[in-house]
Amino acid sequence: MNSFQYVTAHTPDEAVSLIGKNGRYLAGGIDLLGEMKDYIVSPDVVVNVKGMSQPTELGTILLPTGVTNTANCQIGASVTVAEIAAHEDLKKVLPGLIEAASEIGSPQIRNVATLAGNLLQHSRCWYYRQPDIVCLKRGGDMCHAHEGENKYHSLFTGCACLSPVVSNLSVIFAALDVAIKVKRAGKTETLSIAEFYQEAWKNPQTHNSLNPEDFLLTASIPLKRTRSAYRQVSEKSEFDWAMVSCAAAGNVANGKITNVRVALGAVAPVPYMVEAAHHFLEGKSLTDENASKAADLILKDAKPLAHNGYKVPLAHTLIRRTLLALNP
Amino acid sequence: MAAWPNPSEVLGKPATRLDAEAKVTGRAKYTYDVQPEGWLYGMILRSKWAAAKVTKIDLSKAQAMPGVKAAILTGGENRTVRYYGQELAAIAATTKQACLDALRAIEVTAEPLPFVVKEDDAMKPDSPRVFEKSPNVSDPSVREDGHVDDAMASAAVVCEAELRTQIQLHHPLETHGNVVWIQNDHATVWASTQGISSVRDSLNGAAGIPQSNIQVLCDYMGGGFGSKFGAGAHGRIAADLSKAAGAPVKLMLNRLEQGLAVGNRPSSIQKVKFAADKDGKLLAADVENHGSPGIGGGGQTAGGGGGANISMPYIYRFPNSRSKQFGVALNTGASTAFRAPGHPPASFSTESMMDELAVKLGMDPVEFRLLNDPDGTRQEEYRDGRDKFGWAAKYKKPGSDPGPIKTGVGCAGGTWGGGGGGTKAEVQINSDGTVEMRCGTQDLGTGSRTVIAMVAAEAFGLHPSDITVKIGDTNLPPSGGSGGSSTTASVAPAIWDTCQKALETLQQQTGVADARGANWSDACKKLGVTPLSAQGQWQKGLSSGGAGGVNFAEVEVDTETGFIRLKKIVAVHDCGLIVNPLTTTSQINGGITSGIGYALYEERVMDRYTGLMLNNNFDSYKIPNIADMPDIEVILHNKPERGVIGIGEPAVIPVAGAIANAVANAIGVRIHSLPITPAKVLAALGKVPNVTTV
Ligand SMILES: Cc1cc2nc3c(=O)[nH]c(=O)nc-3n(C[C@H](O)[C@H](O)[C@H](O)COP(=O)(O)OP(=O)(O)OC[C@H]3O[C@@H](n4cnc5c(N)ncnc54)[C@H](O)[C@@H]3O)c2cc1C
Ligand code: SF4
């Protein structure tokens, strides 16, 4: 890697003040250090944000005791994926989140990976990660995946870069309608998951909507959806990203689903959602037939590439299974 | 003729590895850990092009950088490079970062040339040529017996398919590399190798040092699977760097280099046609194979003795057979021997077709094999394995499970040569009763140290932990490379012979009639000041060649996601005289793991347009992990009358065929190419919309 300055920040304000124009925040380092070693990114400053003592919310899972319709669970940026996966009380109110966290990588990775790092991890496209290829995302002049080896790439395209979002947490967060609190230009802003990733649709050189100096503080999860589920399929059982993942959340009463949200991962630069599917499902019972129709609606605009057509039936299955898993 | 004791006291009883503790505590020193005084890091600059005409390599900036002690060219400036990863220049420097910085400061001027990295492209008449003077597709090697066309025409059943196997990478956990220290006219080399003598031989003349002045050491090594013979281009480069820098140089490859430049298992595209009569007797086989060894067209190590050729037709007796094999050159790194070269792809295709025939004939696949496999050993293994696996209850009509998640079973067989020879050994017995065995072999991971100690303990009536074992040093009595599953069959007889000679001398010299066991220390005391030393060598009658093995696999396939869960593998192997059941089982477990990777996960992916490899790390070159392992049951068939045989390679051969058959049995359609991924399962089931496979 290229040489860089290493500094430790103790508060978000300090982190933002240290980051400069070409700096990077370092949390667990799983993603960042790999990119630096392969010269994919070469920051001049690396700001260690792991050990921030203030504010305490950065390292905490705050779950209100009496869960009400308006309550939120708040998880700090530096909470590890393993801490989320092992949280017994979260399991009761947000089972889908626990499922999504438990499927990330392997135990070793979950122990180190943080919430912020997981949401902000960069593209896994193998052209992007190849040390000797400079594709569009890295500032080169073309996307090699359009014509090349696109087995793991997006189904929903229309954008210049075909690399999909692969963060498990992004997918379940989309279904749970999570709000992300970010420190931006001296202020605290709140972004929906759609807003958090939409820039990646538009600008092939980005992985999400954060500016390099923006600092992620917390994720706030509404608890009003009492049912949630997450399903994924990878080629291997561990140590592998999902080929497709799906998350769903909603309320089920008297056999009918309301307030439902369904998101797909690894098929688009953002967690992919289709409003028409939500409208269709509203008030319906979660039968295989209805789940299947919802899957048809979600996959209507899929445009398979030469090598990723398998993602269509796979996504269809995962949507059906995830929705059916919402039934109590 | 020499013979093993019967009954035995030590041989055949499970013994933990003598070095187990050293390995798990980190005390065992691998080449990676060797740090001679004043050592430097060595690194190689490699071609970024799949093919290019290099006209200039400017080292001057690199040379001037802090910490850089040597910067050299590895093959002149004006040259044509033919694959991504080919060596161009090298650096020795005081730190890893200094090396990395210097590599990036080397300026290479080159003109990119047309290239081809995919077999199907290279076989087209208008493809760019890998070698200007010869076409990409070689002349075929042809073998023909009987009257294939007539037999096909008269057969009751014929099955035909194109089967494909991928390029598999060795990826030993310890990457390739050496620490080389040239001092005056001597070289000391710590090598991660499966053949210390082969390293010495291949370094002959490197940096001007004659073979006789080269000492190669290898106490521990982290896997080779056939790819770690000789010092490699990187070994000679390390020698040149050490000479230029006047210091020891450690040059270990990184994971990317490991995938590019030190070998792989050749691919195969096999057009296979088998025929049988109405009673299920095989009549004919017709095979046409196009396999790629990259830029390695032939020679000793390319793919293991013959480019990309595979052992077809495999194991069964076909009265009429024809095989035509073509090599396909590609602008990719050369193949090299890989655990049972030529066999796993042959077993996969043959056994796939055998199951297709059995289904067409309405025969049970095991019965069909028993009818056609000429080998008595495998017949026994099929019968034994079938019962332990519970075949009769598990085998059903392909695809007949109701519901989306379907189970299936399959079986497959393999054969291997093995055998031993060419090893000398020495023992020193001291008056305090201590014993030191010396042999210039190496431990590829098969437990050579422990095997040596066990054989000596058997001879002297001692415990294996009483024996000190010295291996991995070319100054010791020579032995061969650890290849062809020949190490134990070569070494154990030499140790036995040596110990028998020593025992005889000891008994003569001391007058103790039986110096073994309880009498050992008294007899040794009588030796006095001068230790006893004896030499011996491999003898006939203690080892033999030829091995057969069969696998049974059970899988569960989710037909809606394509995901395959391996439930069980039963492996039955002929093991000759089992020296150590623990290390034998461990070899078979390892072979199965590698076979599972071949069957389900591993594949080198080249990019057609850049000519570069895309899956250069373990996130995308998918090797199986513990979570992917099924329940494995290893059944050893002990045949002491055969003497010691090899098991390392036989273990891997039938795995992919058995898994492929189990998948086909589960879902009712066959997947004709490895690895069998969820995407291929969904495609085979007709569930994937508009896929164009290019
Ligand atoms: C083999 C393997 C398998 C994997 N499988 C999966 C999987 O199945 N699913 C999955 O979701 N992930 C998977 N991952 C990815 C892994 O989860 C992420 O790399 C990890 O979560 C990153 O977290 P980190 O804390 O190490 O982040 P870092 O590497 O430290 O940071 C990642 C990015 O976030 C930025 N960042 C960190 N904190 C902040 C902050 N507070 N504000 C702003 N920016 C910040 C960093 O600058 C960097 O760009 C896998 C990784 C590996 C190696
Ligand atoms: S998909 Fe995106 S990251 Fe991959 S090659 Fe194309 S531009 Fe680069």
Image: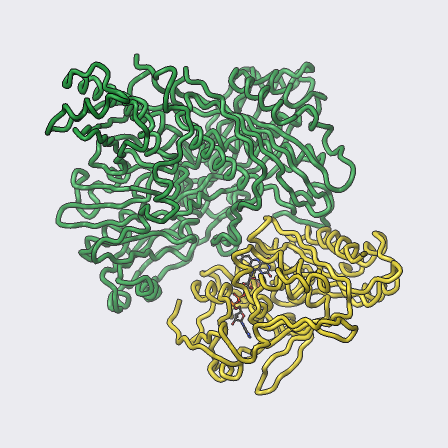
Outermost residue toward the top? Answer: B1
Q: Which residue is pictured at 21% across the width and 34% down the height?
A: B476
Q: Which chain is yellow?
A: A
Q: Which residue is pictured at 44% across the width and 46% down the height?
A: B171
**In the picture, which quadrant includes the N terminus of chain B?**
top left
Pick the front one: B390 or A288: B390
Counting every numbered tag in the picture gives: 0
* Residue B191 x/y as whole percent: 29, 44
Q: Which residue is pictured at 16% across the width and 45% down the height?
A: B186
Residue A193 visible: no
When the figure is inspected, residue B415 is found, relative to residue B162, above or below; the finding is above
Pick the front one: B45 or B624: B624
Q: Which residue is pictured at 66% across the width and 80% down the height?
A: A190
Pick the front one: B432 or B297: B432
* Residue A269 x/y as whole percent: 64, 66
Q: Quadrant of ligand 1?
A: bottom right
Q: Which chain is green?
A: B
Residue B451 visible: yes
* Residue A244 x/y as whole percent: 67, 56
Colour scheme shown: by chain
Q: Please give left or right for residue A226 compared with residue B619 in the image.
A: right
Q: Quadrant of residue A191?
A: bottom right
